[in-house]
Amino acid sequence: QGFKKKMAGIKPLNAVPAIEVDTDGCSYNPPQDAHQEVLAQAVAEENLKNFAKELQPTKRPLTRTAINSLVEEELYRTHGDGDDESDEDDSAAGPSVDAVSEQAAKRSKVVVNNKLTKTERNKLAIKKERQREHMAAAAQKRLRKQVNTVNEIQKELEDEDQRREHERLRRLTVKQEKLQHEPRRLGKRRFQPEPLQVQLTEEVTGSLRQLKGCPTLLRDRYKSFQKREMIEPRVQQKSKKSKMYLVQENGTKGESTRESHHALMAEIAERNLGKSML
């Protein structure tokens, strides 16, 4: 006899309870204070959603460079490249770029492949030695200052380590608190909680018989599975209609065109015959 292996069920990955009990303000006959508090929370959540939509990034406006390029492209399309006019303008404006660069090269005092004299080489060596001595003296001065402030530096390092430790603990606490109310991201989309199931002030009757029905049991279980990280959040995809394509075989395009033309002419002839009989 074979033994059937018992399949292990899907276990939740966080501490969210399977059945969450709503607050007193969501009851069919809630206390006044609790009901007003839940209503204020629902209004705040709705306002946050509206503010988030308003603060979403808008389309980036065109920069001045992009606008100029678009204008130049449009002018090029409408008036052409205008090579002749540009040549005339360049000639009237003044000398060319090559001429200006040649004049600048003549005015420059840089001499290529010129050997220095012994005196000039000695001056350069003395200057470099003085620069090295100055840099070494500055480094020694900075080192003496650091030696005198060792205790202060040690205290700053300890304070920095303590600050980082506090920041790490704070992030860990926030993450743990967030996991109790919001699941981790398992797939492409984030978990979207359901709005609070609370009645408006004019809808509260205090009677269970007059309570409006709201068939959300299946959706409540579905959202509970998502919140407990048992399934990933998904969104219902809209069905896309397949496009119709006209496919014609090789060599049949002319025949189908002629057939449709003959049918059209026959229909026109029948219409003319009917008009003549009238």
Image (tube, helix red, strand yellow):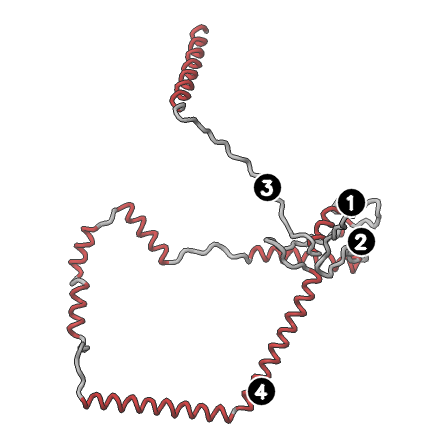
Would you place residue 61 above or below residue 209 in this image? below
Mark nearest the camera among 3 and 2 is 3
Badge 4 amino acid: Lys
Residue 27, which numbered label?
2
Q: Name the spot of residue 87 as percent of width and height, x first.
A: 18, 54
List the single residue furthest toward the front: 1
> Does label 3 or label 2 sit earlier along the sequence?
2
Q: Name the spot of residue 162 as percent of width and height, x first.
A: 62, 80
The answer to whether the residues at label 3 and label 2 have Cβ atoms under 8 Å apart is no
Quick one: SS at disc 4? helix
Q: In this view, does 133 lie to the left or right of 187?
A: left
Q: In this view, does 211 lie to the left or right of 82?
A: right
Q: Residue at x 69, y 66 (%)?
A: 177
Mark nearest the camera among 2 and 4 is 4
Cα–Cα span, label 4 and label 3: 62 Å
> Does label 1 or label 3 sit earlier along the sequence?
1
Q: Nearer the viewer, residue 270 or 249?
A: 249
Q: Nearer the viewer, residue 168 or 29?
A: 168
Cα–Cα span, label 1 and label 2: 12 Å
